[in-house]
Image (spheres, helix red, strand yellow):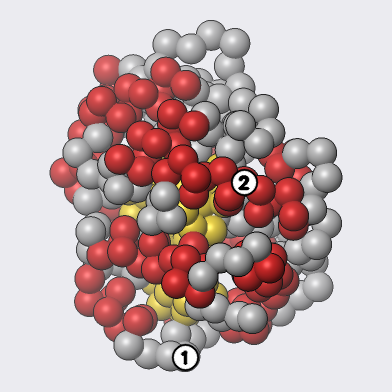
Amino acid sequence: MKYNIIDSHCDTITRIEDENLDFYNNDISHITIKKMVKSNIKIQFMAVYIDYNIPFPNCYFKAIKHINKLYEYEKIYDNLKIIKNKDDLNYVMNNDNLIGIIITIEGGHIIDDNIEILKSLNILGVKSLTLTWNYKNKLAYGAMEDIDLGVSDFGKKVVNTMNDLNMIVDVSHVSKKTFYDVIDIAKNPIIASHSLSRYVNNHKRNLTDNQIKKISELNGVIGINFYKEFIGKNKDIYSLVDHIDRIIYIGGDNCIGLGSDFDGCDVINDIKDCTYTYLIADELLRRNYSEETIKKIFFENYLNLLSKFF
C-alpha cells in the first residue's frame, strides 16, 4: 500500500550535479522527479552536501551553485515548488500535483565561522542545517571523532541564531557531546534527519535510547535512514523495521519519520530507489501497526513539525 511521503534527507541534488544526470528521469539516481511522482513523495528535503575536504570558501561557492540549480529546476518543472514560508507550504499541501522541496545544508563546514553566511543561506530558502558531517568543524565535533569536545562557542551562536530564524537544527552526524549540548541550547524541536537505533545496531552514527527519548521530549522527529551499514547484519527491510520498532518503543509514534539518505548511501537490498519505499508500509502492516501510525511515520509527524517552523 502507498502513502503520501515526507522524506527528511536525500543527497540527490549533489549526485545529479556531480554525475551530470537528468533530474527528471534516469536509471541511476534513487530519486528523480518521475520517481517522486510514482512514489507519492509530497515533500522532499533536498540536502546540499559538499565534501568536507573541500576548503572554505570553495565549499560555500559549490553549495550556492547547487541551491541555484534547485531554483532552476523549479522554473523548468511546473510540479516542483521550493517551500520557503508558510504560504508555500500551504500551497503545496493544497495542490495535489505539486511536490514540495525543502532546501537543507548537510555540514556546518559550509558556513566556516561566519554567522552572516548562515543568515544569507536562510534568505535563500535554506530551512535546516546539519551541524557536522561526521567530523569536527568550526561549529562542533562529529560522530566519527575519537575526541569529543561538543559544540564550540561559535556553534552555540549558530544554534541560537537558527532558533531565532526558525531554522531546523539537525543532529544527524554529530558527536554524543554535541548532541547533548544542542539539547541544552535548543528552544525548538530538533531533528535527526537520517539516523537509526544504536540498540538495534551498535554504530556510532545511530542514536542511543536516551538520545531518542530526548528528541521525543523536544517534540522532534527522527528520520529513518536506509543505509545498509547503519541497519545491521541482514541489511534488509525486516531489519530496517526493527529500528522503527525500537524508536517507537522508546520515543512513541510521534517522533519518527522517513529520512532515506537516498543518493547518499548504499541502500538496503529491498529498496532499489524511492519507488520501493512502500515496502516499509507493507512490513509495518504485517507487524500489525495501525494505518494511523503508518501515516504518522510516512507523512504526518514531519508535517506537524514543519507547521511549527513555517
Residue type for callout 1: Asn
Q: Point out which mark residue 218 bears.
A: none
* Relative to 29, residue 53 above or below: above
Residue located 56% across and 65% down the image:
289
Residue located 43% across and 90% down the image:
96
Residue located 58% across and 38% down the image:
197
Residue 279 locus on image (x, y percent): 70, 70
Number of numbered labels in the structure image: 2
Residue 161 locus on image (x, y percent): 21, 38
* Relative to 98, residue 293 above or below: above
Judging by the rendered image, the residue that carries numbered circle 2 is 243
The residue lying toward the viewer, choosing from 285 and 8, is: 285
**Image quadrant occupied by the N terminus:** bottom right
Q: Residue furthest front?
A: 288
Whichever of labels 1 and 2 marks the residue nearer the N terminus, that label is 1
Residue 43 locus on image (x, y percent): 46, 71
Residue 282 falls in which quadrant of the image? bottom right
* Relative to 167, residue 138 above or below: above
Residue located 66% across and 48% down the image:
242
- Crowd rating for badge 2 (residues with CA inside 10 Å; few <14, some 14–19, many 20+): many
Judging by the rendered image, the residue that carries numbered circle 1 is 97
82 to the left or right of 22: left
16 to the left or right of 46: right
Q: How far apart are the alpha carbons under marks 1 and 2? A: 32 Å
Q: Is residue 201 visible?
A: yes
The residue lying toward the viewer, choosing from 192 and 54, is: 192
The residue lying toward the viewer, choosing from 289 and 55, is: 289
Residue type for callout 2: His
Residue 204 locus on image (x, y percent): 62, 26
Q: Which SS class for mark 1?
A: loop
Mark in front: 1 vs 2 = 2
